[in-house]
Image: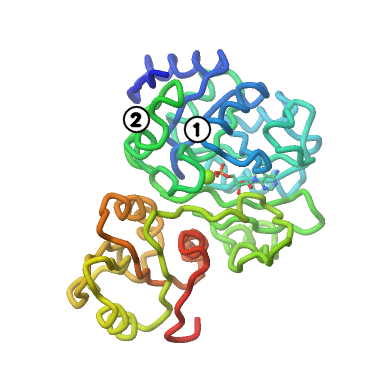
Amino acid sequence: MNTLLLKNNDEDVLKAGKILADGGLVAIPTETVYGLAANALDGNAVKRIFEAKGRPADNPLIVHIADFKDIERFELVSEIPEKAKLLARKFWSGPLTIIMPKGRGVPDEVSAGLSTVAVRFPSHKTAQAVIKAAGVPLAAPSANISGSPSPTKAEHVTADLSGRIDAIIDGGECKVGLESTVLTLAEEKPRLLRPGGITAEEIESVIGEIEIDDAVLYQLKSGEKAASPGMKYKHYSPKAEVILVVGTDREYIDFVNSNSDITVAALCYDGDEKELKVKCLTLGAKDDFKKQAHELFDKLREIDRLPEIKKVYARCPKPDGVGMAVYNRLIRAAGFEVIELEKL
Ligand code: AMP
Ligand code: MG
């Protein structure tokens, strides 16, 4: 299949809308990462997303809307919880996904057979324009091959999916750089299933206390069921082995230098490169979690372009605020392999 490369202008957005309305797949920019979109109301179109990405069929998709009223108009949910209205008023449009009881309009392919559905209203103007041009809500997981780092630039999408999808809209770099925060309101207590750009503290300031699902910070035990199926898979991994190193600045630098050779790289903070004797990929300043979120996937992909690198020692962010989202992605990239030079 020939993949069309579209520009971020009105004419190409209309073209993308037409492809989507006809059951095709288009990768679109959003403020989180690039999404691989299909008509969320068309089970056959949605099936093609799973094929193109090699995504396990039991991992449900997020439905993207461009107007709060789309939820009722397309019967996406059976009921809108009061807390969803409060959160929508504060954080939509934006990088927060809310899980609610599924409505009649959503085919089983989207929810992977679950009785709930995930809904998000992206703030990216192009994403909104494409949804409007398609005239339907769009199911859109990250536009990468399953398991590889999520795409934050159009060239990342091209590298993974060129020839497998109908079109890609190049909208430049994604602002947040990590996937949306996922919160379920479909159970008795609100629970964070995936951390992202909207933090647990921000959500609590609107709806009161929420629970943090164990899978956000810890590895599921074998056989344990994941509330968010996506959290059980090894994810975001470059081909080299990634190892998280917990320690002070000094401990990290001494550890990496005493284990250095040309096959080793460091995924580190600004300034570390002055003292490290290995290839360094910097994520930003130590306390700048937003910058680290923005850089993480691009740097993980850069590692894949360095064939000599077999092992990457990554600094471990504090799992607070947006740092929780960076930690959550890094620990999966590392397959939960951690070296503790000090207690976290
Ligand atoms: P992605 O589309 O790649 O950002 O992945 C979507 C994430 O949302 C995955 O981790 C899914 O498991 C999760 N998700 C989507 N729908 C649901 C749902 N109905 N219940 C729980 N998790 C969901
Ligand atoms: Mg994904």
> Callout 2, which amino acid?
Asp
Residue under the point 28% across and 84% down: 254
Q: Secondary structure at mark 2?
A: loop
Q: Residues within 10 Å of mark 1 (few under 14, many from 20)?
A: many
Relative image position of residue 17 (x, y in whole percent): 49, 17
Residue under the point 26% across and 68% down: 270
Q: Which quadrant of the frame does ligand 1 lie within?
A: top right
Q: Is residue 150 above or below residue 78?
A: below
Residue 312 versus residue 280: which sits nearer the camera?
A: 312
Q: Is residue 303 left or right of residue 224?
A: left
Residue under the point 52% across and 19% down: 24
Real-space CA distance between mark 1 and mark 2, rounded to the nearest whole angstrom: 13 Å
First in residue order: circle 1 vs circle 2:
1
Relative image position of residue 295 (x, y in whole percent): 34, 55
Quarter of the picture containing the N terminus is top left
Mark whose residue sits in front, 1 or 2: 1
Q: Residues within 10 Å of mark 2 (few under 14, many from 20)?
A: many
Relative image position of residue 274 (x, y in whole percent): 17, 74
> Callout 1, which amino acid?
Leu
Residue under the point 68% across and 67% down: 221
Q: Which residue is mark 1?
A: 36
Q: Secondary structure at mark 1?
A: strand
Relative image position of residue 93 (x, y in whole percent): 54, 40
For label 1, being within 8 Å of ligand 1 is answered: no
Q: Which residue is mark 2?
A: 170
Picture disc at residue 100: none
Location of residue 227 by image quarter: bottom right
Callout 1–callout 2 Cβ contact below 8 Å:
no
Residue 119 versus residue 45: which sits nearer the camera?
A: 45
